Amino acid sequence: MNLGDIFSKITRKQSTPEEAPSHWIKCPKCGSLMYHKEVESNNRVCPKCGHHMRLSAKERINLLADTETFEEFDKNLSPLDPIKFVDKKSYKKRVSESSEKTGGNSAVISGECEINGIKVQLCVFDFAFMGGSMGSVEGEKIVRSAKRALEKNQPLIIISASGGARMQESTFSLMQMSKTSAAIKILSEAKIPFISVLSDPTMGGVSASFAWLGDLIIAEPGALIGFAGQRVIKQTIGADLPENFQTSEFLLEHGLIDAIVERNEMKKYISDMITFFTHNNQIKVAEIDDEQNTNE
């Protein structure tokens, strides 16, 4: 080997991050580089620092639902383009790209499943589909899930991961905030449990509607949760924001959510809480029946 060959090896161009092998994952919080199977086996929670990376809707369903119990509903619902919206790309183009990326027609997958043997209605947002934004289809899926929960007397679980309302649908998207909130109100009046799970991120119109209406509101560690972005708030009030502002830890400290639950404990926690809610409801119903019988 001559000197030129040695020099060419030394000066060989290094791989760019895009060219790096996909089987290695870098934690966005601590920077640790880990083999992908190590991260995936821990449900995409960093083994080094505990950072909760984002999950797809399908990964989330596999995490919560008992094996082979999930039945998807309203799969064929797909967005329309009511105002023919175009920015750098048309709305139809963005929907098409998101569909190819996620394999779904919308940012929400809804269906029925069992969680540790308990039948529930489950809605899961997928942030990879247009930032999990809520449009007409997403709102309709949530409302239909609420109706099924009412008809079947089953708890409703919604896992949020959204940037907020979908601007490409304008007012049609904003209407979903009141539409979904009204559906949750009906569940509340019927004493059917609604558990709202806030994952990273839960922002905008989603956080300002059904996501805050849960009988129980829980969040994953480190999740970004709020309405407006921090930069907008800072510019509006003209002051610095507190440390950890809009994180699940900050919200728990100030009493805005009920609990922070580690991802690997989420399934058991939810099933335990459903058991608690339904058991208490059964006791209350029995007490009311006893009181009525006594009065008669």
Image (spheres, helix red, strand yellow):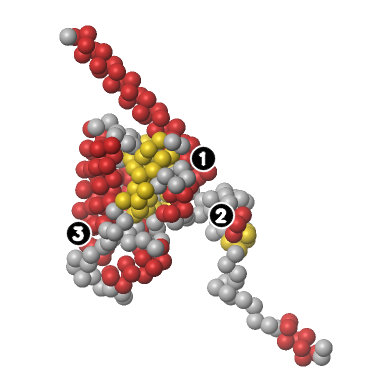
In the rendered view, tell whether residue 64 sits above or below residue 38. above
Tell me which amino acid carries mark 3. Thr
Q: Residue 152 versus residue 52: which sits nearer the camera?
A: 152
Q: Which residue is mark 3?
A: 171
Q: Is residue 13 left or right of residue 55?
A: right
Q: What amino acid type should be assigned to the residue bearing mark 2? A: Glu
Determine if residue 156 is in view: yes
Does the image show residue 209? no
Who's the residue at 24% across and 57% down the image? 136
Query: Does 193 sit above or below residue 89?
Result: above
Q: Which residue is mark 2?
A: 40
Which quadrant of the figure has residue 184? Answer: top left
* Residue 90, image x, y percentages: 28, 73
| Quadrant of the snapshot with the C terminus | top left
Q: Which residue is mark 1?
A: 265
Q: Residue at x 36, y 70 (%)?
A: 97
Q: Looking at the image, tell me whether mark 1 or mark 2 is earlier in sequence order.
A: 2
Q: CA distance from mark 1 to mark 3?
A: 38 Å
